Structures are given as C-alpha cells and as structure tokens.
Amino acid sequence: MKDFWEIISVILLSSVKFSIGGIPLALGLGFPFFKAVTTTSIGGIIGTIMFVYVSDFLIIWWNKLRTKKKDGVIKKRFTWKNKIIIIVKRRFGLLGISLLTPLLLSIPFGCFLAVRFFKNKERILVYMFASVLFWAVSLSSFKLLFPE
C-alpha cells in the first residue's frame, strides 16, 4: 500500500512540476530507472492533457472578460514580459516551448503558452508528450550514470 501512495504522489507532482518535483521525488524514493521514467511520464502526460484543455477555457474566459471591460475595444500594452514571450515564440516556435516546458517552465504555464500561441491542439499534445518522454529518460538516467 505504501508503494501505491508513492507512485500516486510522483504522478501528481510530475503533472505540475516535472523536473523540479516529480523526477527528484521518484529518484529520492529509490524507484528503479524504468519505474521512475514510467511514473513521471504518466504524470507529465496527464498534466499536459489536463492543462491544454483547461488553458483553452481560461483563454476564452479571459478574452470575454477583457471585452466586457473595455466596451469591445481591447487596448494592447507591451511590457518587457510580453516582448520576451513574443521573442521566444518567434524564434523557437512550438518546438522550443515544448522542449523548455518540463525542464524550466512548469507544465501548466508551458501548456498555457502553447495553447495561447498555437491553435492545433493535437500538435501541441504530440510535442509536449515527446518532450515529457525525452526529459523523463534524460533526467532519470542520472541515476544510471551516477549511482550512489
């Protein structure tokens, strides 16, 4: 029963904080390589599916809220954060966002950015799944390369 709760906690943490939470927790609990990759990948994939579709509803809600406030006229303000996001989008595209999401960004924020800028959800999901699997194998392999 203890093993079941450890697996559930790794899956839940991996669905939100992949490289900072899920992988270190799995390796800290002493999961073997295949179990660590499997549980963290399942968590990352579940989080990706959930946050891609939740982000879509948040964007629709936010756009409705903004149009009600400004009487249909949306005034755009460019801040330094907006400029950085636009530079990343133009320079790296969906591939760059999906590769950075599990490692540096959190899965919810990366999925939100991807849905905000790219409309093809199937493509977003495929890129995010591939990125989650890549980082799960890469980060979990540290245990194989550097045993205690």
Image (spheres, rainbow, N blue to C red):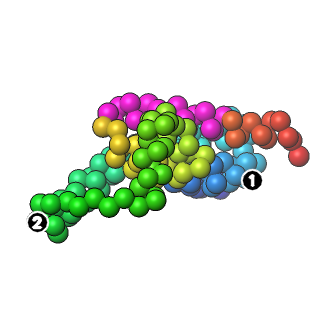
Q: Secondary structure at mark 1?
A: helix
- Quadrant location of residue 41? top right
Residue 123 location (% of width, % of height): 38, 30
Residue 88 visible in the shown view: yes
Residue ID for mark 1: 28
Task: Look at discs 1 and 2 and give the one toward the viewer.
Answer: 2
* Magenta segment boundaries in residue numbering: 120-137
Please name whichever residue, 38 or 100, is drawn nearer the observer in this view of the structure.
Answer: 100
126 and 42: which is toward the camera: 126
The answer to if 61 sits in the magenta stretch is no
The three-letter amino acid code for the residue at tag 1 is: Gly
Front-most of residues 3 and 31: 31
Q: Residue at x 85, y 40 (%)?
A: 146
Q: Is residue 114 left or right of residue 1?
A: left
Question: Which residue is identified by label 2?
Answer: 71
Q: CA distance from mark 1 to mark 2?
A: 53 Å
The reply to whether residue 47 is in sight is: no
What residue appears at the point 71 percent right and 40 percent down from the top-left corner?
140
Is 130 magenta? The answer is yes
Label 2: how many residues lie within 10 Å, few (<14), some (14-19) or many (20+)? few
Specify which label sits upstream in the sequence, 1 or 2.
1
Which residue of the protein is positioned furthest toward the left in this rendering? 71
